[in-house]
């Protein structure tokens, strides 16, 4: 009985000492975007900005000129899609228990089209698919 009490005490002490240990990480995951459009769009000039919530999306779509430095270029794939790195972060606690995973929930896409011979910049918001790791989505732009 005494050995059991000592073992339980040691286990409790180790748990108390090791519980705060965590690994914090920062990275990005690739988001592959396929464009579905009925008008000609210059996909090489497409830009993407990330947003944490819907209010940011609305504000960015209504005031894109205020946030030109927020938009990033996308990389074109040979398969015809586009890919952009989406930032993510999180932490893992003891033995991988109680981990978190954070990433922006929305993107705003800037695309350029020809409107009667005049180039037009347009913006539209989309939700990023849920999950972890690489993801794919289709964006419908007018």
Image (cartoon, rainbow, N blue to C red):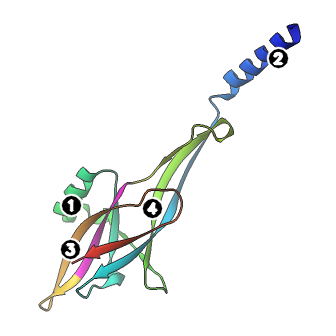
Whether pointer 1 and pointer 4 mark residues with C-beta atoms closer than 8 Å, the reply is no
Question: Along the horizontal axis of the image, is 136 left or right of 46?
Answer: right
Question: Along the horizontal axis of the image, is 28 left or right of 93?
Answer: left
Whether pointer 1 and pointer 3 mark residues with C-beta atoms closer than 8 Å, the reply is no
Residue that mark 3 sits on: 122
Residue that mark 4 sits on: 86
Give the x, y percent position of residue 95. Answer: 69, 38
Give the x, y percent position of residue 93. Answer: 62, 37
Q: Is residue 126 above or below residue 5?
A: below
Q: Earlier in the sequence, mark 3 or mark 2?
A: 2
Q: Earlier in the sequence, mark 1 or mark 4?
A: 1
Q: CA distance from mark 1 to mark 3?
A: 14 Å
Q: Is residue 104 above or below residue 123?
A: above
The residue segment tinted magenta is 105-112
Q: CA distance from mark 2 to mark 4?
A: 46 Å
For the C terminus, the image quarter is bottom left
Q: CA distance from mark 3 to mark 4?
A: 21 Å
- Residue 76 seen by the camera: yes
Q: Earlier in the sequence, mark 1 or mark 3?
A: 1
């Amino acid at each position: 009985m005494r050995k059991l009490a000592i073992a339980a005490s040691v286990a409790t002490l180790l748990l108390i000492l090791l519980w705060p240990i965590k690994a914090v990480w920062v990275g990005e995951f690739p988001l592959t975007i396929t464009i579905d459009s009925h008008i000609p769009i210059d996909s090489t000039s497409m830009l993407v900005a990330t947003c944490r919530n819907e209010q940011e999306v609305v504000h960015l779509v209504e005031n894109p000129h205020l946030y030109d430095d927020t938009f990033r270029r996308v990389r074109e794939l040979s398969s015809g899609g586009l890919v952009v790195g989406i930032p993510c972060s999180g932490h893992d606690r003891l033995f991988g228990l109680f981990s978190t995973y954070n990433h922006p929930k929305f993107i705003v896409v800037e695309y350029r089209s020809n409107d009667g011979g005049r180039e037009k910049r347009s913006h539209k918001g989309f939700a990023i698919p849920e999950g972890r790791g690489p993801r794919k989505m289709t964006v419908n732009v007018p």
